[in-house]
Image (cartoon, rainbow, N blue to C red):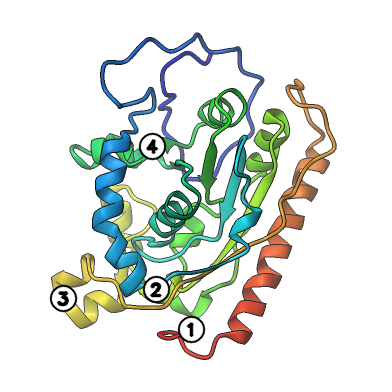
């Protein structure tokens, strides 16, 4: 049963799973600091924006197309393609929207991030939330926030360079079901640049099994820069395109939604995103200069 606390059940990826209808959460208790019930701190986000700003503007040189399609008010579920051994797409999207629109963005991701000492706290302060459907529902339906999810999950970040910009299956369509239940639009975002910022050239399945993670990447950054490659991104130019919001003609808060309708909606969004990715790649003249 959902409560006023953040749901922290471990998940296998950052993609949302279908959920059962949640009960209303109790009103949050008054807080003496700016840290909200999810662990997000606007003071921390402000500091992170100052630090990340030069990377966003000068290293990745992010360009947006269609940013006005993101709602100025109300809840919306943002979905994007995902790539890179240590993905750069999430901070670029969150920074861009918060800077340009002045709206906070909560990033839904694997519980693994929350469980890491120190890193988990910093991740939560920066707007990270475990990708549990109950958490997504509360953010979207009850609090009318923007939430960002990557339906490919670890299948997207685990792609090697030869598979770049080929979208993986969008899980079981859980993001569509949660949008239906919350009564909010899905806003697709296609990202070009993240595949080249930290490309994976090989993976070690044996080491991954030993340490219990989905994959252990060997990146071009590591081969070129050694240990610094774990933190150093290549200066690929980021281009982001916001597609038309997708709404679903179904009533919110239903106990069940037709699985065929959910799968159809997820696949339609995936195909539209793939088509736009190919279009952006055709128009790109250079990985580094756009």
Residue neighbourhood size for the residue with mark 4, other residues' Cα within 10 Å, grouped as few (<14), some (14–19), many (≥20)? many
Residue on which disc 4 sits: 111
Q: What is the C-alpha distance between the residues marked 2 and 3?
A: 25 Å
Dot 2: element: loop
In primary-sequence order, the first of circles 3 and 4 is 4
Which residue is outermost to the left? 227
In primary-sequence order, the first of circles 1 and 3 is 3
- In this rendering, would 159 be left or right of 273? left
Q: Can you tell which mark lies on residue 290?
A: 1
Label 4 close to label 2 by CB (< 8 Å): no
Total numbered badges shown on the rendered structure:
4
Residue neighbourhood size for the residue with mark 3, other residues' Cα within 10 Å, grouped as few (<14), some (14–19), many (≥20)? few
Q: Could you tell me which residue is drawn at 39 percent across and 27 percent down?
A: 38
Residue neighbourhood size for the residue with mark 1, other residues' Cα within 10 Å, grouped as few (<14), some (14–19), many (≥20)? some
In primary-sequence order, the first of circles 2 and 1 is 2
In primary-sequence order, the first of circles 4 and 1 is 4
On the image, which quarter does residue 61 sit in?
Answer: bottom left
- Nearest the eye: 7 or 140: 140
- Nearest the eye: 45 or 38: 45
Dot 4: element: helix
Dot 3: element: helix
Which residue is outermost to the right? 249
Residue on which disc 3 sits: 226
Give above or below for 193 relative to 143.
below
Dot 1: element: loop
- In this rendering, would 171 be left or right of 216? right
Q: What is the C-alpha distance between the residues marked 4 and 1?
A: 34 Å
Residue on which disc 2 sits: 61
Across and down, in percent, residue 244 comes to 72, 57
Label 2 close to label 1 by CB (< 8 Å): yes
Across and down, in percent, residue 289 comes to 43, 86
């Amino acid at each position: 049963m959902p409560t006023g606390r953040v749901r922290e059940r471990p998940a296998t990826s950052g993609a949302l799973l279908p959920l059962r209808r949640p009960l209303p959460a109790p009103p949050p208790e008054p807080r003496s600091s700016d840290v909200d019930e999810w662990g997000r701190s606007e003071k921390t986000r402000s500091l992170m924006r100052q630090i990340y700003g030069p990377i966003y503007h000068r290293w990745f040189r992010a360009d947006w197309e269609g940013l006005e399609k993101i709602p100025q008010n109300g809840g919306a579920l943002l979905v994007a393609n995902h790539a890179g051994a240590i993905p750069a797409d999430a901070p670029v999207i969150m920074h861009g929207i918060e800077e340009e629109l002045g709206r906070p963005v909560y990033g839904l991701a694997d519980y693994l991030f929350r469980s890491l000492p120190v890193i988990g706290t910093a991740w939560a302060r920066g707007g990270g939330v475990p990708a549990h459907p109950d958490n997504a529902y509360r953010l979207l339906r009850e609090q009318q926030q923007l939430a960002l999810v990557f339906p490919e999950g670890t299948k997207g970040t685990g792609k090697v360079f030869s598979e770049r910009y080929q979208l993986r299956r969008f899980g079981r369509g859980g993001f569509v079901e949660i949008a239906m239940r919350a009564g909010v639009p899905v806003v697709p975002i296609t990202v070009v640049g993240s595949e080249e910022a930290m490309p994976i050239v090989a993976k070690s399945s044996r080491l991954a099994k030993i340490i219990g993670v989905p994959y252990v990447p060997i990146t071009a950054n590591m081969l070129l820069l050694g240990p610094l490659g774990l933190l150093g991104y290549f200066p690929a130019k980021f281009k982001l395109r916001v597609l038309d919001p997708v709404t679903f003609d179904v009533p919110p808060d239903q106990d069940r939604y037709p699985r065929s309708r959910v799968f159809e909606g997820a696949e339609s969004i995936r195909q539209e995103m793939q088509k736009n990715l190919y279009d952006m790649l055709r128009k790109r003249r250079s990985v580094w200069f756009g």
